[in-house]
Amino acid sequence: MTSPRLHLAGITKSYPGVVANRDVSLTVMPGETHAVLGENGAGKSTLMKIIYGAVKPDAGTVVFNGRPVLIRNPQEARALGISMVFQHFSLFDTITVAENVWLGLSKRLSLAEVTHSIAAKASEYGLDIDPSRPVHTLSVGEMQRVEIIRALLTNPQLLILDEPTSVLTPQAVEKLFVVLKKLASEGCSILYISHKLHEIRELCNACTVLRAGQVTGVCNPAQETNASLSKMMIGAEPPLLTRRAPKVGVPVLQVQDLTLAREDQFGVDLDGITLEVRAGEVVGIAGVSGNGQKELLYALSGEDVRSSPGSIRIGEVDASRLHPGGRRKLGLHFVPEERLGRGAVPTLGLAHNLLLTRHEAISSPRFAGGWIKVRQLEAHAAHIIQRFNVKAGGPRAAARSLSGGNLQKFIVGREIDAQPTLFIVSQPTWGVDVGAAAQIRGEILALRDAGCAVLVVSEELDELFELSDRLHVIARGRLSPAVPIGDASVAKIGAWMSGLWHEEVQEHLASLAPTDLVGGQHA
Amino acid sequence: MLKLEARPQPSKLWSLASPVLALLVTVLIGVVLFVALDKDPVSGLQMFFWEPIRSAYALGELTVKATPLLLIALGLAVCFRSNVWNIGAEGQYVLGAIAASGVALLADKTTGSWIVVPIILAGILGGMFWAGITAWLRDRFNANEILVSLMLVYVAVQVLSYMVSGPWKDPQGYNFPQTKTFDLVTRIPRLFDGSRVSIGVFLALIGVIGTWIFLFRTRAGFAQQVGGLAPAAARYAGFSSRRALWVALLVSGGMAGLAGALEVAGPIGQLTSYVPAGYGFAAIIVAFVGRLHPVGMVFSALLMSMFYIGGELAQSRLGLPKSLTGVFQGLLLFTLLACDTLVNYRLKWKK
């Protein structure tokens, strides 16, 4: 029997106030694609950083190819044959692909040699990339390819990928899987970190499940079901959502030809966005992040008031120039993507965080001198905490003391409790554990059934398919036409995420070989 | 290597006790300092911590100095809580003094005591105007308010010295850079005979209550602070950052101007080039040592006032340099920052 490529035993790492890993063991065989599954905060990333030498464990041993090793830093990890592709890329925007790769390599090679070896690796694995392109012209999927090529150039025996698909379209994910399967067939071991169950079941042939820093299961994911995997991951099966047929009413939000130049240099220009949300329906907007979602939401919420008159109507009122407070009076309540610092003030208690969008506890709130009735405010916060099942140390607990999921429940609760007629939510369950995510989705559907118009912007296609009645796709600042959820498929929405929704483009693509479809991310 | 590591749960008790601990450390360093200067540390400390509270008169003097410090610090606390870094309260204080003097100089034998009201209002408006320049430059051109407000201090001092050595110079003043002594009727009413304590104390205490209500009980005060704590959250909520900027600077400018008016029309009684006594800068320390809390600042203003008086006494009685005041003020701020850091972080030795 061959010795394992990597064997961890008894790995423990604690940070002040939290144990990230407790007595974790993990065995990866050569050529194995091994999933590390767990919710946010389960300790996956810490474990990977320990393997990669970026974090030093408090206790435990690492054995690589049968030899006990002490990996003190990423250079030593790379020397052993361990490479890692991080969730956040470390590429310099202003220089070319080849120059970026060259920076991380031994100085003995010339740029021409590096360019040549990039091209060689790229063609070997079908990672189509031009080494002479500046990085800022690349799409997110292409940047990831650069990171993978950079990792492969060191000829790794173990490749670690941290949530690699969170930034990819479904087609790009398929293409990535082809590359990973080829690598595994050549004997390279892969550690694949994810919380997406179907991906793991498709790709991996071994799986270690972490919960709260401890191993709760080792299995072959191909032989498991989503339900059994999530039971290991969260200790329970997620509740099922029930969807009723929508009772669609009058249009509540009408966006007409919204065109808006970017506010900051690295933003996206919005180009002719037209959108309608009616009472009693959920409209979803899919898209890879950084395609104008942020800018669109700023314009809709009133945080950006530069929209031209008439472009945004809430009910009967032209809201394009109204500030957030004015739009809230029209019944718009909005949950932003960033919870700490935008949706809530980190250092303030939950009760005072209500005051950001709620005025019930202020006498004569229209005046600057409006008096804050603290007792009523705290009672109100306690009510929301109880109704939305928020785990917090009471109404005075600082927002930053809550876990991401619980703060999200509080913020969503704060806005839903206001009984909005128009509810806009961005990434409703991003970084939220499975149980809380199910609860939040249930609340959103309940709001819809109560006759509220709901707009959901999300990068998670599963979530959008679960919630939406109609789907749009946003790509490079433009919005696709709406598709009723019954007519939408992952393949179609995925193709649209690349900005390819015009009929003539679709026809043209249909006439091409399917492989060309997948590369269609770039500008 | 020594490293700072964030404490998971900073102790509530210690973060409240931190200013007290900082004071103790300051006193300890003070003892070392006196010994190094070859003075008896006990009598040295006595100058700072006992003499200023020994008698009713001394307490009065303590209050006289604490009043402007507290007024300015109250305004600065509103500013700092809004994340607006007004470092130029000294300049606003000087402008308040100049504007108040302008009104006071109009008084003559026939004027009634109502003149005190326009004097005080002029001081407030003068300070607001000076801070308003900073607000406008920041709002219009996105100029850095730290630099602008600080540089305007020096402009204000130049304006002052022009006024007292030019148009407003006392013709009978032997060419000293000062105005004539104001008419008695312009003097801010005093509380008791034989003490220099004026109704300014009441204004400061009203300021304490007003600031507390504004910060912790009004919608506007809440909105003001959200802009400082989390600007993106303020934008999300729809609280105007421009309004917060203007309110912060006008409030602190007005408070500093009020302090300036009370000073020239009170203890000083004329406009001289010695008006800028560093209250505007010392008030920054008062604000932070008082934790930007209106009640906390009452204590820190008294403490800082002790340092002022103690420094003067140490000079006259022990022959020590007056700059000892500044040394103690600086030490206190420094040790407070150090204590705060250690309350929130722990030191760890790491390889």
Image (cartoon, rainbow, N blue to C red):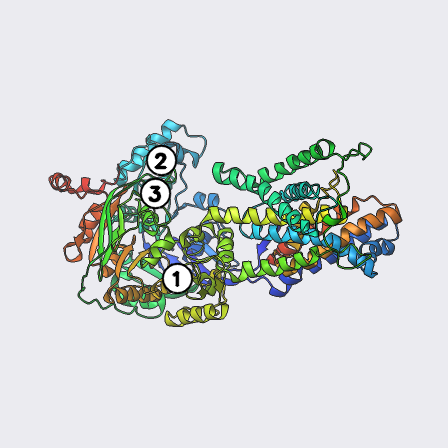
Q: CA distance from mark 2 to mark 3?
A: 31 Å
Q: Which residue is mark 3?
A: A306
Label pair 2/1, CB-CB below 8 angstroms: no
Mark 1 or 3 closer to N-term? 3
The amino acid type of the residue labelled 1 equals Ile
Q: Is residue A18 left or right of residue B63?
A: left
Question: Looking at the picture, how far across and down is residue A70, in whole percent?
Answer: 50, 51
Which residue in the protein does label 1 denote?
A: A411
Q: Is residue B9 above or below residue B171?
A: below
Say which chain tag 3 marks.
A
Residue placed most toward the observer, B241 or A75 = B241
Asked if the residue at tag 3 contacts the one at tag 2, i.e. Cβ–Cβ closer than 8 Å, the answer is no
| Chain under numbered label 2 | A
Type of amino acid under label 2: Val
- Pointer 1 indicates a residue of which chain? A
Q: Compute the Cα span from label 1 to label 3.
A: 26 Å
